[in-house]
Amino acid sequence: MTGATYHVLSVPLRPEFAELRQPPDMEQPWLIDKGEPYAALAPKAGLTCAMDVDRKGQKLDDFVFNALRWLIVSERVRAVLAQEPGVETLPLHILDRKKKPVAAPYFFVHPTGPEDCVDVKRSEIMWSNMEPTRAHTIKRLVLDPSRIPTARALFRIKTKPLVTIVRSDLVERLKQTGATGYRLLELDSRVLL
């Protein structure tokens, strides 16, 4: 897309808001990290995840902080992101600190098929000793736009699949909904991913 810019989509942890520390119970969770489709394996009733009982914060926002750095979002955000190609949305039931389901619906948004689009020469990457093709830490992230499919406005990067990238036109659509609870990190600048 001509003139488009990309950002890292991040969800900050804030004191008054809930954190989901434990992953939901699911079969073959490694498929998520690989970017493989997961909808066929997900329980029909949806995934379930509980708030961290050690945190005082219990408020939920449109984007929910979680230890896995997955996209856990409200219905209004899901409605926008679900329109993107290569994106699965799965119902996710959040339990409060008393293990009671929260009333508002939430969803796990899973961009499938991580894109191999990192400009490794211009990025600052510390590689994993366990998996040499995976980044352990990224201090500067630079993408090669020519390796990003034009249809992808939301995707994860193959070098570090926990990092989610969002295109500027999709950011504008999110802003139009009034969505809160996320921040954008600039590419080609100092980051710690």
Image: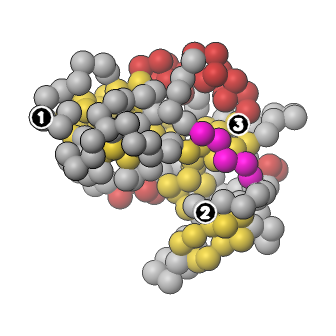
Circle 2 crowding by C-alpha within 10 Å: few under 14, some 14–19, many from 20: few
Q: Quadrant of the N terminus?
A: top right
Q: Is residue 184 magenta?
A: yes
User: Amino acid type of disc 1?
Assistant: Lys
Tag nearer the camera, 3 or 2 = 2
Residue carrying label 1: 98
Q: Residue at x 82, y 50 (%)?
A: 146
Residue 37 rendering spot, x and y as whole percentages: 42, 43
Mark 1 or 3, nearer chain start = 1
Mark identifier at residue 192: 2
Mark identifier at residue 107: none
Residues in magenta? 183-187
Residues at marks 3 and 2 touching, judged by CB atoms closer than 8 Å = no
* Distance CA(mark 1)–CA(mark 3): 38 Å
Circle 3 crowding by C-alpha within 10 Å: few under 14, some 14–19, many from 20: some
* Distance CA(mark 2)–CA(mark 1): 34 Å
The reply, left or right, for residue 118 in relation to residue 101 is: right
